[in-house]
Image (cartoon, helix red, strand yellow):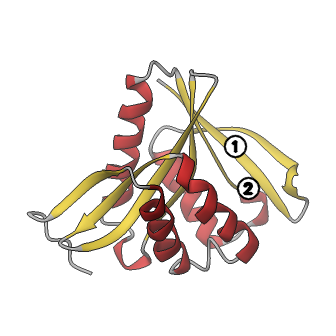
């Protein structure tokens, strides 16, 4: 899909209902990453209590990032998605930069993100890991008990 540079923008989302609608719309289009229906429903509900920014191309919402803050000093990327047609176009980087700027502005010293471990060797999540590593996130720890042993959770962290 084409990005209209003049109409591409990142906007903060305040309304809780709209946060859920955006999450549902984007996550429904990313079954390779969000194929677990129960987990997806949980994200769609819980995203309401997070900070969120959306990426808009013209009138189309093409992605979003949602952030939580832990103990006033650690940001946490709660859920993050870009519609597949818009991958590799710099949208994720723009959303990530927006979230990181917000977190740093609160005085946070680090930001974390949880993703499927590369020990699973599943290409969509290998691409996700590559994205975070390219943006200066470092592997921190793999938890088999966080989700389950078939879906080990890799936690990454970036220190500001």
- Taking the image as shown, residue 53 lies to the left or right of residue 68, namely left
Extreme left residue here? 6
Between 124 and 79, the one lying in front of the other is 79
Q: Which label sits on residue 155?
A: 1
Q: Image height check: is 43 above or below 98?
A: below
Instruction: Indicate the secondary structure of the residue bearing disc 2.
Output: loop
Closer-to-camera residue (5/52)? 52
What kind of element bears circle 1?
strand
Q: How many numbered marks does the figure carry? A: 2
Say which quarter of the image contains residue 68.
Answer: top right
- Residue 150 found in image quarter: bottom right
| Residue drawn at the location 42% of the way across and 64% of the way down | 18
Residue that appears at 47% across and 63% down: 17
Relative image position of residue 82 (x, y in whole percent): 43, 67
Q: Which residue is mark 2?
A: 117
Q: Residues within 10 Å of mark 1 (few under 14, many from 20)?
A: some
Task: Give the residue at x 63% y 72%.
Answer: 34
Alpha carbons under labels 1 and 2: distance apart: 8 Å
């Amino acid at each position: 899909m084409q990005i209209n540079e003049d109409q591409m923008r990142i906007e903060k989302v305040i309304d809780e209902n709209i946060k859920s609608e955006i999450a549902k719309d984007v996550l429904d289009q990313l079954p390779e990453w969000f194929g677990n229906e129960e987990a997806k429903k949980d994200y769609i509900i819980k995203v309401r209590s997070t900070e969120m920014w959306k990426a808009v191309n013209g009138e189309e919402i093409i992605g979003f990032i949602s952030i939580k803050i832990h103990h006033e000093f650690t940001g946490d990327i709660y859920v993050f998605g870009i519609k597949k047609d818009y991958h590799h176009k710099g949208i994720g980087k723009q959303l990530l930069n927006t979230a990181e700027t917000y977190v740093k502005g609160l005085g946070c010293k680090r930001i974390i993100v949880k993703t499927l471990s590369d020990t699973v060797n599943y290409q969509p999540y290998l691409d996700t890991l590559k994205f975070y590593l390219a943006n200066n996130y470092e592997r921190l720890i793999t938890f088999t008990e966080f989700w389950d042993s078939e879906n080990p959770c890799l936690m990454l962290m970036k220190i500001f």
